[in-house]
């Protein structure tokens, strides 16, 4: 496209052409916003315009779409739904996911006149966006849409909000001389791969190679950078054990001999033990936040640390550093790999043996639970069945709470071709996020793991999945309650489980397979662990949206983190 060729067009035509130019394939929304633009998308592009059952799930679908593909996910709401959409951006913000939220907003002609449904929504987007802007003049659409994509995918990625004039964003019906110019570089993460300062790479390598008992903690920055292969290659070259954050779980298969598991609060005991036994922790693409460090107890503050991050402000935030490197994870790891001294690996032989012994002790400790035939089914066994039977190219999408703990700790990715995406804290995120992921990457199997409390939140979206043929598989760990809350409520009831305490976290027994069938999806109920592999195989072959309702033990509590 040539620059400087304005032509008369409507905002709607400009939006449709630009989203198409940025390779957007789906927009998730609750009507009515951008009505004219949606009509133009139908005429001018193949973009699918999915109307869904709530603005929060629209935001979660856009987030799942973005995390699965690296391309910004687009969601929208009219003015009355804007805060619902903002609520849904919180997980994208916490997970650094490039979501672009478009809302209808105030018209300068009618502001402050008690317009129906209107409040000033813009401030509510401030804590969950990198860029939060209003567009009042249609002629500003091209530069502002470009800025939205540019901001969402550069540096540390994250959400953006654009508010269009008019409660339904009717700005899109206005005409102006415009040029729908796009910058394809900003259609996905990473847009740039900033090269680190050579001296900082050498300094970090020096510290790493000198260490006798180092461990790498790989975070979500490794997945955003697509640096998993380089990470594993460096760990192998220097013989360093690798723990991951929940967000970085797909940086290394759990079955790799150097993997010790997910570290932090929703973690695996072996990972916490290895990190706490290390003499140096190398954080790569990790915020060193509370979840990953078990609130800075794993590793303890004072442990020698080095850190590699695309965001210079992250370097040293929680752990004083022996060396910090500012750069893209993939290019930094490539440089380290090229410059590293592989002979130093020999001195870590005893340390590797110790880390592997600790991992082996974890496997022995949980062997019985991972293979349990108990009825109702143990969640550990369910996780283990997923480890054994998920396809090599699966995208695994996991909710928070116990779902995050069970899958973080008990489930292993077995192939570098598998991806893992997790809720950054919101219960209910995973089911819609899994649908969004499947929209983004329809050729890959998407398998979501959620508890029943998590599934209840956005259960209406089964109908969306059936209507749009979004053939994701959702596994519900159905124990008839939100039992991660059990310990806390027992505590305030004198340390024991009472009927009154149970009122605060248990639900009616529900057959989600039957509900799924009624709403147009395939529903499979599993009551025996041995029946799960066949159910999963049937689900993956069905080419339909599927809910596998697994009846599990309400008394099963995930192990708490060791520190
Ligand atoms: C938006 C939001 N509200 C509340 C919570 C707190 N919370 C965490 S886990 C949980 C219950 C989880 O229940 P379920 O999904 O059924 O999993 P289970 O613990 O039963 O395995 C709650 C309420 C949260 N994480 N997010
Ligand atoms: Mg539950």
Image: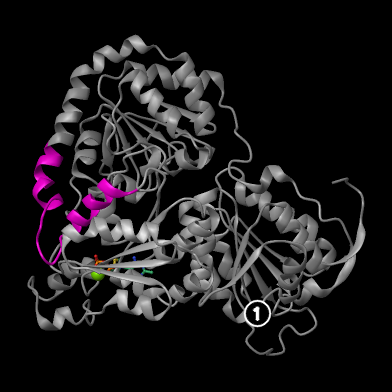
Please give the residue where the numbered disc 1 appears in the rendered image: 32
The picture quadrant where one finds residue 513 is bottom left
Q: Position of residue 387 (x, y in %)?
A: 27, 47
Q: Is residue 557 visible?
A: no
Q: Quadrant of the C terminus?
A: top left
Q: Is residue 309 visible?
A: yes
User: SS at mark 1?
Assistant: loop
Magenta residues span 361-390
Disc 1 crowd rating (10 Å Cα; few below 14, some 14-19, many 20+) is: some
Q: Position of residue 347 (x, y in %)?
A: 25, 13
Where 93 sits versus 209, above or below? Answer: below
Tell me the chief SS of the magenta region.
Answer: helix
Where 559 sits versus 515, above or below? Answer: above
Where 289 sits versus 17, above or below? Answer: above
Q: Residue at x 14, y 30 (%)?
A: 357
Q: Position of residue 192 (x, y in %)?
A: 63, 37
> In which quadrant of this rendering is ligand 1 seen?
bottom left
Q: Residue at x 53, y 18 (%)?
A: 199
């Amino acid at each position: 496209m040539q620059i400087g060729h304005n032509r008369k067009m409507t905002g709607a035509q400009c939006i449709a052409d630009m989203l198409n130019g940025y390779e957007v394939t789906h927009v998730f929304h609750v009507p009515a916003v951008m009505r004219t633009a949606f009509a133009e998308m139908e005429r001018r592009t193949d973009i699918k315009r999915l109307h869904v059952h709530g603005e929060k799930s629209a935001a979660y679908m856009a987030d799942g779409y973005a995390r699965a593909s690296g391309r910004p996910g687009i969601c929208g709401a009219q003015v009355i739904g804007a805060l619902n959409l903002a609520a849904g951006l919180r997980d994208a913000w916490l997970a650094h996911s490039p979501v672009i939220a478009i809302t209808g907003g105030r018209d300068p002609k009618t502001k402050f006149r008690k317009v129906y449904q209107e409040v000033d929504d813009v401030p509510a987007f401030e804590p969950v966006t990198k860029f939060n802007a209003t567009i009042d003049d249609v002629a500003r659409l091209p530069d502002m849409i470009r800025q939205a994509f540019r901001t969402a995918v550069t540096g540390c990625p994250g959400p953006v909000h654009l508010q269009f004039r008019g409660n339904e964003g009717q700005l899109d019906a206005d005409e102006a001389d415009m040029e729908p110019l796009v910058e394809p570089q900003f259609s996905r993460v990473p847009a740039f791969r900033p090269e680190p300062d050579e001296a900082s790479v050498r300094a970090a390598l020096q510290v790493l190679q000198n260490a006798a008992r180092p461990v790498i903690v790989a975070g979500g920055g490794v997945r955003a950078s697509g640096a998993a292969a380089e990470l594993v290659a460096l760990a192998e070259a220097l013989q360093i054990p690798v723990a991951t954050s929940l967000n970085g779980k797909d940086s290394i298969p759990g079955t790799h001999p150097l993997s010790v598991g997910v570290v932090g609060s929703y973690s695996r005991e072996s990972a916490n033990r290895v990190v706490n036994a290390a003499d140096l922790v190398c954080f790569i693409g990790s915020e060193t936040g509370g979840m990953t460090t078990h609130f800075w107890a794993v590793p303890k503050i004072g442990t020698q640390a080095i850190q590699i991050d695309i965001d210079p402000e992250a370097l040293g935030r929680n752990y004083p550093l022996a060396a910090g490197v500012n750069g893209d994870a993939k290019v930094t790891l490539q440089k380290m790999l090229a410059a590293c001294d592989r002979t130093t690996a020999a001195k870590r032989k005893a340390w590797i043996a110790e880390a592997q012994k600790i991992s082996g002790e974890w496997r022995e400790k949980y062997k019985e639970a991972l293979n349990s035939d108990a009825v109702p089914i143990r969640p550990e066994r369910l996780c283990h069945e997923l480890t054994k039977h998920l396809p090599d190219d699966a995208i695994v999408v996991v909710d928070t709470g116990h779902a995050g703990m069970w899958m973080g700790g008990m489930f292993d990715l077995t192939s570098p071709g598998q991806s893992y995406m997790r809720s950054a804290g919101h219960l209910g995120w995973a089911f819609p996020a899994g649908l969004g992921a499947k929209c983004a990457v329809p050729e890959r199997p998407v398998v979501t793991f959620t508890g029943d409390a998590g599934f209840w939140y956005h259960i209406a979206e089964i109908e969306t999945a059936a209507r749009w043929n979004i053939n994701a598989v959702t596994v519900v760990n159905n124990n008839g309650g939100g039992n991660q809350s059990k310990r806390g409520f027992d505590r305030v009831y004198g340390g024991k489980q009472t009927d009154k305490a149970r009122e605060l976290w248990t639900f009616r027994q529900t057959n989600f397979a039957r509900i799924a069938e009624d709403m147009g999806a395939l529903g499979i109920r599993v009551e025996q662990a041995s029946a799960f592999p066949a159910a999963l195989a049937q689900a993956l072959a069905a080419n339909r949206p599927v809910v596998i309702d697994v009846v599990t033990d309400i008394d099963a509590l995930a192990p708490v983190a060791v520190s």
